[in-house]
Image (cartoon, grey):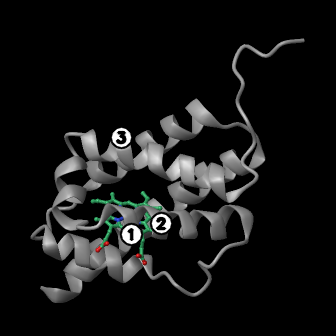
Amino acid sequence: MMKSKSLKEIKNRDQVSTLVHTFYEKVRKNPVLGPVFNGIVDDWNIHLERLTDFWEMVLLHSGPGAGKFSPVPVHKEVDEKMNHQVHEAHFSTWLALWFETLDSLFEGEVAEYAKQHAHKMGHILFFKIMEGRKLKL
Ligand code: HEM
């Protein structure tokens, strides 16, 4: 039986790299997220390599990512750089683009886990940003 789409399972770093590159292409063009990312990230090659390390670590438990990331302070800083204007729409848009990218390229357990993990991280990051703002008042 032929499948209508030739979606693959995520099995190696090259595929994670494709996922990350395709996702940030969309992010950079997006009216809600584009201005944020283009304003903060100055070297896209470094950012894409770093985020490939992150997702390779999370999804495949391999690569040089272990111990290298601290997403909570990083996103609190992003909120500061944006004069505390990060809101829920940034997170819902981020997740919609992430899901859309995954669904267009991959299938299987690892791809599903990538959605779940980002969804959970989104909640934690948003909560921590809000919590940090409150403590400052
Ligand atoms: C929804 C789930 C999200 C996940 C899983 C996620 C994940 C990450 C990770 C792993 C990093 C690298 C952290 C590090 O370098 O230690 C990062 C960086 C970054 N994220 Fe997110 N993120 C999410 C949402 C968002 C949102 C909504 C925004 C915008 C409001 C955002 C803006 C950024 C920016 C600008 C950077 C780069 C910061 C820098 O290089 O200085 N992220 N993100």
Q: Which residue position holds label 1? A: 46
Vertical arrangement, residue 50 with respect to residue 89, above or below: below
Q: Are marks 2 and 1 in contact (CB under 8 Å)?
A: yes
Q: Return the mark for residue 114.
A: none
Residue located at (73% from left, 36% from top): 8
Inter-mark Cα distance, 2 to 3: 17 Å
Secondary structure under badge 2?
helix
Residue 14 on image: x %, y %? 64, 53
Q: Are marks 3 and 1 in contact (CB under 8 Å)?
A: no
Residue 15 on image: x %, y %? 64, 49
Q: Which residue position holds label 2? A: 49
* Of pointers 3 and 1, the one earlier in the residue sequence: 3
Residue located at (25% from left, 49% from top): 33
Nearer to us in this view, 50 or 58:
50
Please identify, in this view, whether the residue under mark 3 or under mark 1 is nearer the observer: 1
Q: Residues within 10 Å of mark 1 (few under 14, many from 20)?
A: few
Secondary structure under badge 1?
helix
Image quarter where the C terminus lies is bottom left
Vertical arrangement, residue 58 with respect to residue 94, above or below: below
Secondary structure under badge 3?
helix
Q: Quadrant of residue 48?
A: bottom left
Ligand 1 within 8 angstroms of badge 2 C-beta: no
Q: Quadrant of residue 43?
A: bottom left
Give the residue type at disc 2: Glu
Q: Is residue 84 left or right of residue 7?
A: left
* Residue placed furthest toward the left: 83
Q: Which residue position holds label 3? A: 26
Quadrant containing ligand 1: bottom left
Nearer to us in this view, 71 or 128:
71
* Residue placed furthest toward the right: 1
